[in-house]
Amino acid sequence: MSKPVYGKMAAASRNREKLPAALLVLMIGLILFLVWAPFQAGLFNGLVLDFERPIYWAVLVGSLLMLGWVATYFKSLKLEDQRDWTVLFVLLIPITYIIALISAASQYFASNMVLIQSLYAFMFVISLYLLQNRKSNLVIETTVITVGYIIMLFGLFNWLGQGKTVSAIVGWFTGTVVNGQYTQAIWVDANGPRLASVFQYPNTYAAFLMAFFFVAVFAITRSKRWYSQAIHAFMLVPIALSILLTLSRGGLVFLPIVFIILLLFLKPAKQILWIVYCLIAGIGTLVIAKPVTELGQQFHLGQIGDPAKGWFYVLAASIVLAVIACLIQRFVAPRLENGTRKWASKKLASLWLPLVSVLAVAVLAALFLGTNLKHILPGNIGERLENLNLQQHSFLERMTFYKDAAKVVKDYPIIGAGGGAWASIYEKYQNNPYTSRQAHSFVMQYLVEVGLLGFLVLIAFLAFIFYKYIRGYIQADEQKQESYFVYFIIVLSILMHSLMDFNMSYVFLGILVFLGLAGMAAAMDSRPVEKFTVKPGMMRGLYSTIMVVASLILIFVSIRNIQAVGDAAKGKELIATSTDFQEIKAPLDKALQKRSGQPDAVLYLSSLLQAGFDQTKDEAFYNQEQTLLTNALKKEPFNKDMYKQLIKLYQSKGEYDKAYEVYRDNADRYAYDMSWYENLIVQSYELGYQKLGEQDPSEKEQYFQTGLAAYQHVVDGVEHLKTLPKGQMQGNPFEITQSMVLNAGKMQFMMNEPAKAAEIFKVGIKDDLSDSTNREIARWYLAALQKTGATDQAVYDRLLKVDPSEKASIEQLANLTF
């Protein structure tokens, strides 16, 4: 048996040879893909039409790259060692998403996630083989780092007023540039302007920056050439400054945690250098943070015209740091290496500085959070830090998401509710009426989507690669350790931050993670798996066939999906610009032919058919729309917009009983949708009152009981919301409306429960009785009291003062019997 070797690569003689043409083509394709992808809003899987087309293009390109990989590595395929087996193991991840289609809350979102997870698997397999070659590893690593720096600079250019210039550079290959400006590169919310760069979301951008900050620090200490050290050191201040400009508290919390973990992998000399560079970068950033932050804020709030002078501060600090870093690496680092050699040889030598760093981070955190030191930061950054605590609304809301996600997992424990399930299903399980189509935790969202089965597969995959990488790292020499450490930094940083945010909903970041995992796996020792050896010929034939077939399927599906999205978008555009029914309908029909049940196409076509029915009362429009919606809802049983369209259709034809059934049967899916319950209560009263007139007491009772149960649900919900922690925001409005009170009170009154009716009506008594609804509630309230032998003289006097004729109306109501 050959001795296991960490990061076993091709023979040195082979590495000196020119790379094969097929491999060069594959590498160029991957490089172009990595440059293109982040500028498509990071390929955000936002579960809306506008974000979908770039994702399908990414899957298409990834599938083409996979075909190129098969052509390049067909003769190299084997299944002999543990590293080889990971290319089979990774396929289990998209397979778990395929299995989750069985119970998917949304077939559409779940199918999209199958494509995305397949893309991740393809990226892992392709990268695993590429990164085992020294030259291609160097090229891919350089590409990843360069792309990271470009994204960071793109963000700063937007912050300092050159957004239109840099947007023009990328605008020819991305649809995210609108009217000459990259959309939401700068967020403006209640906290003021926040830097988001290509991701359009500051928190995810902070996670990305954190990864590349540590990559830059590592690259300085690894580089042997002064100009390479200078380039990476030059980037430290802009990256650290960008992290502050995101105003991401999560980024500031996870940054020291990841830093301390990474220190554990370094020798004492490198640990000291890392600490020194982080301190210098931190000081340099704090020196320029206020003027650069204020210039950007004033520009994006429209207070100044040109903040470009902020570049003077950034460039000055960056150049100073680059010079200092070169001097340190030239004169200090070698002496530090020699001076700590005896210390480094001792057992557990690498533990002491991380432990000291923990104490130092704790002291710094206490100073920034508990003293006036935070005021050296720009105002809004200091304010964000000041509000950092476990009772802060952002933390409390995340904890609520996780608890609600656990409820979903309880109902879908084994195979999950399918990809994208959280966005479809969260309203059924939510604790309060928030709006969040992301669970703000990769772990919880993954559990929701693929259940325990899929989660265990992912954890086993990650655990195996991390274990093998760390074990090999410990045994390797310094050169081999440094060959793949960049990938470990990226994977660790993004996954750590993803524990409390939805970074992995950005397909580009998912690609980086799986590329990084491939880099870690490439560093794995090539220990043979003798019990499961497969003949190379069989492996080549079987695996390459699987990957080719999968690639071809994904290419076909991606093209169809791209066309369907394009047709749906065209139909949407025509609805706003055209009055020709057939012209509008044609692209929507095409979209549904290419992808049946496409939600946006269904809704647009439904609206079009509804307009046709409203104008002509032609039953053909009605029947077509009803069939369209009912078929679509079989695949999208939680799509509220489709239910609303169906309700509107029934109401337009006067089929209020069918509309009522849709409200009733789906009320539990929208627990805090106030308008849903209000409409259900109204419909229950009107249909029950109709049955009362038809002398059908049993039917009346059923309708009234449904309406009263809906009213009680709202009452209970309002009471529950009063128990929310003080720092937690409620979210959307959820309250007892006057319409609810009036209709629920009437139902209780007509069920011969005047005392209970009076209790309901009392909730709606207002000072302003000039309003007709308020006056009607007061009238019924007084009539209900009169039936019980009681009265409310104050309300009675106020009502009669507004309208003396109300006295007769009250008497008339009080004398009614049901």
Image: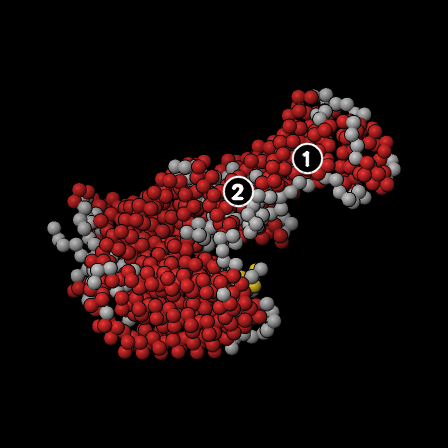
Q: 83 and 787: which one is in front?
A: 787
Residue 254 is situated, as x and y percent measured from the top left of the image, at 41, 58
- Give the crowd class for mark 2: few <14, some 14-19, many >=20 residues within 10 Å: many
Q: Is residue 77 visible?
A: yes
Residue at image point 35% right, 56% down: 492
SS for dot 1: helix
Name the one closer to the observer, 215 or 87. 215
Residue at screen point 27% across, 78% down? 331
Between the C-alphas of marks 1 and 2, the distance is 24 Å
User: As rendered, which of 532 and 622 lies closer to the eye?
Assistant: 532
- 794 to 82, vertically: above or below: above
The spot of residue 72 in percent (x, y) is: 26, 56
Q: Is residue 490 above or below residue 228?
A: above
Q: What amino acid is at disc 2?
A: Gln
**339 on left or right of 697:** left
Tell me the element at label 2: loop
Amino acid under label 1? Val
Which x, y percent locates residue 405? 46, 43
In the depicted view, which residue is nearer to us: 334 or 573? 334
Name the spot of residue 123 as percent of width and height, x first: 33, 54
Decide which of tag 1 and tag 2 comes sooner along the chain. Answer: 2
The mark found on residue 682 in the picture is: 1
Residue that numbered label 2 is attached to: 430
Q: Quadrant of the C terminus?
A: top right
